[in-house]
Amino acid sequence: MQIEPSKGINHLRDLYAQFNAIHIDQLERRWIAISLMVIGLFVGIITIDALFHGINPPGKVETIDSASLHLSKEFAEDNLGVQVDEKGAIIIRMVAGRYSFFPKHIDVPAETPLTFRWVSMDVLHGVHIPMTNMSTMIVPGYVAEITTTFPKPGEYPLLCNEYCGLGHNHMWSNISVIAKEDWKAPVKSPAKGEQQ
Ligand SMILES: [Cu+2]
């Protein structure tokens, strides 16, 4: 069914008139307005974060077998940590497992886009790095990919933020962010999927 534009506007006007005709206490009206403003504020914050701070849900789904990560091409032990791919992009592969992130410590450059690829070897984990847009679930069976940039050199903690068992509060790692000019790319840089 199609509504003609003029009819649509009239319909809205009728609704507004009906709404106005209902008796609503002045105080109640004020609170309705305040609640609508709060909703508007939240929607505004979400929109600004999504457009300007890159805080979005992951846009693609990539699956992986959690039970055989150590045998996989990409997440075998030798491939974990910081690597530079053939296009010069920095890719960091990490495995989350009860109760640590592997590798336990990495060095990365500041002011450079870094793509983190996370997988879980057992249960649901989360990863959060304060002061960045990094906060994601690591769901077993899926690869979580996030691109972030550290604005300043320093030591950043990396925390699990999904309860994963008794040792959950000991599950953390740390990242040393080094000034861009002082950072040296790791020597070994195999292309994705090249190593067995
Ligand atoms: Cu945890």
Image (cartoon, helix red, strand yellow):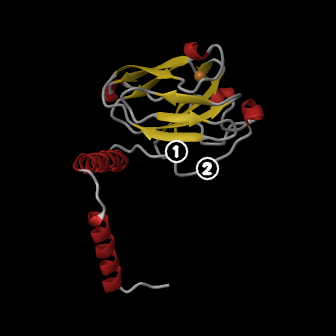
Q: Residue at x 47, y 33 (%)?
A: 135
Quarter of the rendering occupied by the C terminus? top right
7 w.r.t. 184: above or below: below
Q: Camera-side residue: 22 or 130?
A: 22
Residue 38, given in percent of the width and then of the height, sits at 30, 45
Q: Residue at x 28, y 66 (%)?
A: 21
Residue 58, given in percent of the width and then of the height, sits at 52, 47
Query: In the rendered image, which residue does mark 1 sit on?
Result: 86
Q: Camera-side residue: 78 or 117?
A: 117
Name the image quarter holding residue 100: top right
Amino acid identity at mark 1? Glu
Secondary structure under the numbered disc 1 in the rendered image: loop
Q: Is residue 187 visible?
A: no
Query: In the rendered image, which residue does mark 2 sit on?
Result: 61
Picture quadrant of ligand 1: top right
Q: Residue at x 33, y 23 (%)?
A: 153
Q: In the visual, does 8 lie left or right of 169? A: left
Amino acid identity at mark 2? Val
Q: Residue at x 32, y 28 (%)?
A: 181
Q: Residues within 10 Å of mark 1 (few under 14, many from 20)?
A: few
Residue 105, given in percent of the width and then of the height, sits at 52, 18
- Residues at marks 1 and 2, CA–CA distance in whole angstroms: 23 Å
Q: Residues within 10 Å of mark 2 (few under 14, many from 20)?
A: few
33 w.r.t. 146: above or below: below
Residue 68, given in percent of the width and then of the height, sits at 77, 33
